[in-house]
Image (spheres, rainbow, N blue to C red):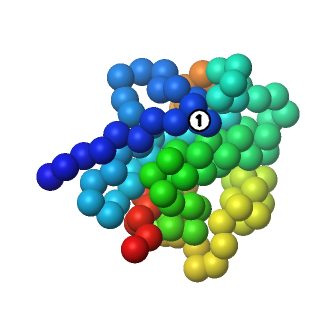
């Protein structure tokens, strides 16, 4: 099995001992992305909607580095610090992902890195 590591300056640098993403064959596995601005390495302000927008922007940058787009995503996992934000996050998600939608899980987490309100990770299949 050959693994290729994804690294892009268009998404925040890893804040721990992990890669932004890994390519194995045709599969792309992203690390969790939160609402960190890749230029300042600070959380965006504006609450869960602003964080979700930035996190998906960050995910999109990692996928682009692997030759993919959000349309190539087959599975996402959403982490919310408060499940009451689900409807607001779902609105952002619906604007960024298109039918046929990826399979998805959404869970409430007691705490997320950097005090984030939202985190997303994805699995994508690289196009032919």
In this orientation, which residue lies closer to the viewer: 111 or 95? Answer: 95
- Residue 124 visible in the shown view: yes
In this orientation, which residue lies closer to the viewer: 111 or 92? Answer: 92
Q: In which quarter of the image is the C terminus?
A: bottom left
Residue 18: x %, y % from top left: 37, 29
In this orientation, which residue lies closer to the viewer: 113 or 8? Answer: 8
Residue 124: x %, y % from top left: 44, 61
Location of residue 12 (image quadrant): top right
Q: In this view, does 90 lie to the left or right of 114?
A: right
How many neighbours does mark 1 have within 10 angstroms: few (below 14), some (14-19), or many (20 or more)?
many
At 41% from the left and 65% from the top, the residue drawn is: 126
Residue 102: x %, y % from top left: 52, 69
Is 23 above or below relative to 54?
A: below
Is 74 above or below relative to 17?
A: below
Q: In this view, does 12 lie to the left or right of 50?
A: left
Instruction: Please count the marks in the image.
Output: 1
Q: Which residue corresponds to mark 1?
A: 11
At 61% from the left and 36% from the top, the residue drawn is: 10
- Residue 109 visible in the shown view: no
Secondary-structure class at tag 1: loop
Task: Please identify the residue farthest to the left as the structure is shown.
Answer: 1
Location of residue 4 (image quadrant): top left
Q: Is residue 107 left or right of residue 45?
A: left
Task: Please identify the residue farthest to the right as the structure is shown.
Answer: 46
Location of residue 6 (image quadrant): top left
At 78% from the left and 53% from the top, the residue drawn is: 88
């Amino acid at each position: 099995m050959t693994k290729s590591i994804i690294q892009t300056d268009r998404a925040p640098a890893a804040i721990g001992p992990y890669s932004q993403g890994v390519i194995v064959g045709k599969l792309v596995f992203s690390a969790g992305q939160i609402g960190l601005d890749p230029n300042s390495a600070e959380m965006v302000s504006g609450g869960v909607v602003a964080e979700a927008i930035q996190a998906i922007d960050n995910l999109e940058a990692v996928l682009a580095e692997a030759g993919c787009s959000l349309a190539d995503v087959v599975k996402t996992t959403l982490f919310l610090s408060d499940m009451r934000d689900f409807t607001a996050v779902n609105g952002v998600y619906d604007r960024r992902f298109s039918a046929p939608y990826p399979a998805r899980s959404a869970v409430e987490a007691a705490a997320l890195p950097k005090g984030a309100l939202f985190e997303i990770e994805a699995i994508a299949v690289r196009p032919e």
